[in-house]
Image (cartoon, coloured by chain):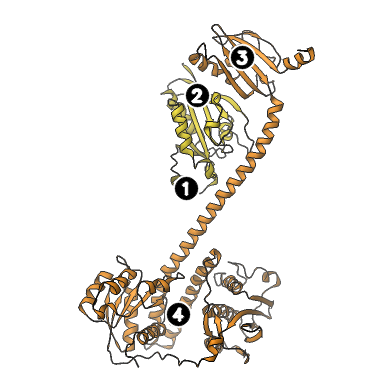
Amino acid sequence: MSKLSKKIALVGPFGVGKSSLFRRFIDDAFSEDYKSTLGVQIQKKVIQMDNGTALSMILWDTEGHEEISESRSSYLLGSHAFIYVFDLTRIDTYKNINDQIVFLKSNYPNVLLKIIGNKVDTVVLKRVKKSLKEHNVNYDCLTSAKTGENVAELFVDIAVDLTN
Amino acid sequence: MSNSNKERFNNKVQLITTNHNGIVSYTDLNLFNNVSQGDIIYDLHPFFEIIKSLLQTYTPTNNEFSFPCVHLTMGSSSKERICDVNITIELAEIHVIIFDYTETYQELNRISQERNESIIKNQELVFSNKLLLEKESFKNDFIANINHEVSTPITSIKGFLDLLRKTDLSYEQDELVQIILRESEHLERIFGDMLDLSKIETGSFKLLDEPFDLKDLIQSIVESYKHIAEENALEFKVDIDTKLNPKMIGDKTRIYQIVNNLLNNAFKYTEKGFVKFKVSKKGGKYKKQIVEFEIEDSGIGIGEENQVTMFEAFVQHNDKGEGSGLGLHVVKSLVHLMKGTIDVESELGKGTKFTLDIRLRHDIEDNDKKESPKLKLKLPKSGRYRVLLVENKRSTQYLITRLLLNQGCFFVDVVSSAEEAIKAIENRVYDLLILDIKLTGMSGFDLALKIRKEYADEFIKDIPILGISAIKTLNIENMCAVNGIDSFLAKPFSEELLVGKITKLFKRKGKNIS
């Protein structure tokens, strides 16, 4: 059985639910209380892939910044994937998202990037999709750390992409 | 460094040295005391997996890496520390220096938490507000649209019922037709209330400010309720103050709507006894006058607990469960718009009294003028007016045709589109064009403009045009005028209103009528 280790960094503005997604995936738990992340929290979860590979997903839950360029570069160093998270209930977290994506793609061209809209359980999807369209936001998936909607699927997708 | 400082420093820093395979060759135990020689550093905490990446990318000149503010625990029993970690990669060894800044970072975290919470709350409020505005706008568009869609069939239903009543009906049939007519009017009122409310809530509701005759208005209200009182065997007590100045300036239609709503309720909830309608001059100086309306009944009354909420939207306080629960809310909103007041006194089983004070202005100029004779809504019965009706709804085509033919003085040609209308007016002279504004294809506005601007033939370009529509936007009449439409009639309308509008239009245009 082969073993692989991949670093995945959760990035994006503060309060969008990066730590909640992290906690939902690692411990399958959720708390309503907002607790801001200072610096970086790191956890590991091993996923057994269909091809027999044991994939260690090393998740770096980084503190939130409105501009990704403000993030500490050492946190992003050596990443195999970025999960850029924005908050579906706060336009400010996605209105300039394309600038953040350009930054990530130009500075980390070989790193897998997934763009995630979180807190899907709290919004009227039709209206939010309209707003996302207005701001030209192309997302990969909409999640809810609270209900778990699409969270496991997101990490499994990333695992598959990283092992293929 | 003094011994005490050295001790303090040592308590905050831990050095771990490994080889390139991650095997620990040296460690002190200042912070994490469960680290031992021979341990694999990657197993101590997932953070150290980063060393594998660094080993692939470091160079002799780029071999020092700094990771501030990393949350570390080593082993299940160790407490979490927030540390800065420096990693230096040398040819044979890797040095990891961990600095514990937990206390400093925790203080920073408290400040950051407060700042973030405040910003997030603010951003969420902005977003919620935006969504609310969108919802409100959607609701108002929906109500305006549904109102338009409903007005057209109601016009047809009421018009055909009027026609039906003029045929030879048995007593029972006539009763049934009257019931349908009443229910249609009720439906019309509900939709009217919804539209009014939506406009009031968005602040787009505008009161008219035009001269009207208060006594005429009161008289028409009294007349319309006299027969209802008779039908229901109720005493209708009317008391009109003779000191009232008849010439006023205000919104006649909305005053009618308010009083009509209250009287309608009074009759609806009174099975025996009386309904009293009193109008008096309460006060006012110079050009202003406060007119007080009292509507009192001996009906079922309203309990004290319900009197507080009775003016709220969608609130009903009757066992009958009738009405939309909008009427009184609209009444109160209209009264407020007029800077007036409305009060209620009521006792269960004894009756209700509404007192309504409305501020109006005198139409002083008009007092000096002689009253103009009322327009007679009579058209000659010689069959000499040719009307082109441009309307795409078959039921409305039929209704208007029947209403006009009933007058005995119209020939009516009917087309369904502006394009057909153009062909018709180019081939025949018409005395009147009745034009639905919301046509499919070329709109009524576009057709009217084309007639006014593109034809030299005065029989075409000067043809009187009466616009009709269920659209009830505030400036519809202005839009009609701008587009060359002489007069406008809102759906639903009665035979009298239609004929009245045509008569006025003909007079204005100098058409020969009696």
Query: Which numbered disc, 1 or 2, marks the residue that appears first in the sequence?
Result: 2
Residue B181: mark: 4
Query: Is residue B125 shown above or below B158?
Result: above
Tell me the CA gap for discs 1 and 4. Answer: 46 Å
Tell me the CA gap for discs 2 and 3. Answer: 20 Å
State the image coordinates of residue B459 (x, y, percent, origin top left): 25, 81
In the image as oriented, which residue stretches furthest toward the left? B427
Q: Colour of chain B?
A: orange
Query: Is residue A88 shown above or below A152?
Result: below
Tell me the CA gap for discs 3 and 4. Answer: 90 Å
Residue on which disc 1 sits: A131
State the image coordinates of residue B231 (x, y, percent, origin top left): 54, 88
Q: Is residue A101 left or right of residue A59?
A: left
State the image coordinates of residue B129 (x, y, percent, origin top left): 56, 53
Residue A79: mark: 2
Q: Where does the N terminus of chain B fall, quadrant-wise?
A: top right
Q: Residues within 10 Å of mark 2 (few under 14, many from 20)?
A: many
Residue B96: mark: 3
Query: Which numbered disc, 3 or 4, marks the residue that appears first in the sequence?
Result: 3
Q: Quadrant of residue B19?
A: top right
- Dot 3: what SS? strand
Q: Which dot, 4 or 2, sits closer to the camera? A: 2
Q: Are marks 1 and 4 on the same chain?
A: no
State the image coordinates of residue B489 (x, y, percent, origin top left): 40, 77
Q: Residues within 10 Å of mark 3 (few under 14, many from 20)?
A: many
